[in-house]
Amino acid sequence: MIKFIIEHEDKKSKARAGRLITPHGEIETPIFMPVGTLGAVKGLGSEDLEDIGAQIILGNTYHLFARPGLDIIGKAGGLHNFMQWNKPLLTDSGGYQVFSLKDFRKITEEGAHFQSHVDGSKHWFTPESVVEAQRIIGSDITMPFDECVAFPCEKGEAAGAMHRTHRWLDRAIKSFRANPGKQSLFGIIQGSTYEDLRLESTAFVSNADVDGIAIGGLSVGEPAEQMYQHTEVVANAVRRDKPLYLMGVGTPHNLIESVTRGVDMFDCVMPTRNARNGMVFTSQGRLHYKDGKYKEEVNRPLDPACNCPVCRKYSVAYLRHLFKCGHLTVLRLATLHNLYFYLATMREMRKAILEDRFSEWKMETLAGYDRGVII
Amino acid sequence: MIKFIIEHEDKKSKARAGRLITPHGEIETPIFMPVGTLGAVKGLGSEDLEDIGAQIILGNTYHLFARPGLDIIGKAGGLHNFMQWNKPLLTDSGGYQVFSLKDFRKITEEGAHFQSHVDGSKHWFTPESVVEAQRIIGSDITMPFDECVAFPCEKGEAAGAMHRTHRWLDRAIKSFRANPGKQSLFGIIQGSTYEDLRLESTAFVSNADVDGIAIGGLSVGEPAEQMYQHTEVVANAVRRDKPLYLMGVGTPHNLIESVTRGVDMFDCVMPTRNARNGMVFTSQGRLHYKDGKYKEEVNRPLDPACNCPVCRKYSVAYLRHLFKCGHLTVLRLATLHNLYFYLATMREMRKAILEDRFSEWKMETLAGYDRGVII
């Protein structure tokens, strides 16, 4: 079970600093969780994640079910052992992934039939089986199976999916609480971009027997302003004694704006995926290190203000050279920088909250992003 | 300049332990040099190479000339700075690469015209320009531009290429010595698989004003026995006060047999390339970690006898899982293991030579390789 302690609340916003105590250690919130879908962050070992200060990482139930399979993870004694990560672990339920299969799944009230994207084999997920899968995986924080809708979505469809998600949450809670262990279960708020649905879902999940509350179905293509608006609607109505997790978000700017509105936890593939595609986040905004204009920048790191193992050592010209050669090493180096930058931003933000200077820190930090990289 | 100190010679073979003192530190021989063609070993940063005990690594003049270009490396103050590697560095001349271009190069007595494999641009390498290129790169040990032949090769062609290589070596030495600095220059023995040519080339290079002697043109497709035979012919005839470097070799078994015959230095892409293709070297021979039979080996490392950061931590089932998913992390982990295994094998071999138990160590170690991995 987790325990959530709120340490300090900002006076001018809903930002707060807290601690989440899990069976595998404490997490300082607000927190960003690197994504290791298949049991590893691409290009990194778990020792690298420890080195750059990751406190909790994410796995994905659907992906781990497909490969290597729950039998292998069970045999290893859970995902912590299998991937040799001894800190907290959260697993997404796979709802989002199953619903992304589109032509290869069929939803009923009981659950979802689907075909594996790996080998086409047929499977069956229910709220109960997804609880059981995560019991085998052994994650500290588990997520319930939910019905996700695309953006944009008709209101009737959004309401239907949301109500089913609520019924499935009740079944997940029943199954989860029937066999209590060390794990925790969050609830997921849905409702697409309809304010009244978001409020209804917030009330439902607030009253449910869950250990934390997640906002699902945002960051799926809607404009950032709409994402902020719905995050605010939820955060203003949700019970505040549990951690609030905004799923799949986002840029450093998105994280800061969402913490302002009351969010405690985040995950996103953006820092890792963008790193591999030639883009990093810096204190002066985005930097496309693959650009020809960095060819001769042999003395400048990705971000002179960054203290990561890559910026302390390598030049942007070196990273650009390796990227142009299609060299594996750069994927790792850029990933290390981006994750370090995200984690450091969260640490600084937390410190600013604790020291009652969050709004000043936010203004300065966002001004830096807006300034843009000048070379 | 380098200085070579022979510390101990084996009584029953030509194996020896020594020290090579370079401007960037000392190297304990016999040594294996990981290959970082473009200024990085694939999947690793230079900090990783230090962590696993690499003492010297290899870069390639032709590849670095093509990308990022000598102007960029010069601007960075040399390859050591550019790639942030502060230990010894050897650069191959690019002779082998230029001659591999086949339809895209033309050889004259003056040098080689060729088209870059990257952008088709036309260039011109001479013995003098290759010395100059490596001066800009700043490697501790430089190699002369040589004419490489394929295997098998007609004797007339092999003799012609060898004689040209000798004439080019004289020009390289003249150019190199005209402007003395901290770097060293090796000579390369050619002669394909003809014993009399090998002897002629050995005599020529032994009498040349070079700091070390390399055997080129082996490990190019000939049977291992033929490679050992020609290595022996050279090692028995060569002057023994200079380090002997067998280029492009080989498996752990090859290294042990070649040290027995008198070789001090090696480089090869085998440990890194094979790692990425799903195969590792272990104390019990080769292990194809991608095989289905390792699917459930959640408690067994790649090599229980190995003390590398990967074997101390991860299971072969985990590596297999990541390989089956096409996951970047496994390329790094398998590379770390293979390079560590090579470097540890060289360290153990050196210790055995120093302790007068090389032949016993060799017998036991090769018996282990032959035993094969049993799971």
Image (cartoon, coloured by chain):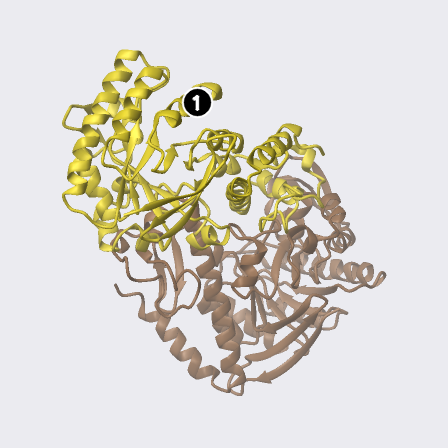
Chain colours: A yellow, B brown
Q: Residues within 10 Å of mark 1 (few under 14, many from 20)?
A: many
Q: Quadrant of the C terminus of chain B?
A: bottom left
Residue that numbered label 1 is attached to: A227
Residue A145 seen anywhere in this rendered image of the structure: yes
| A24 vs B353, nearest the viewer | A24
Residue B274 seen anywhere in this rendered image of the structure: no
Give the image location of residue A241, x and y in percent. Answer: 34, 37
Q: Is residue A221 above or below residue A125?
A: above
On screen, residue B94 versus residue B182, left or right, reads: left
Q: Quadrant of the N terminus of chain B?
A: bottom right
| A268 vs A240, nearest the viewer | A240
Give the image location of residue A88, x and y in percent. Answer: 36, 49
| A160 vs A10, nearest the viewer | A10
Q: Is residue B347 above or below residue B179?
A: below
| B97 vs A292, nearest the viewer | A292
**Secondary structure of the residue carrying numbered label 1:** helix
Give the image location of residue B57, x and y in percent. Answer: 60, 60
Who's the residue at 39% across and 43% down the image? A36
Indicate the amino acid at tag 1. Met
Give the image location of residue B37, x and y in percent. Answer: 60, 51
Who's the residue at 17% across and 42% down the image? A177
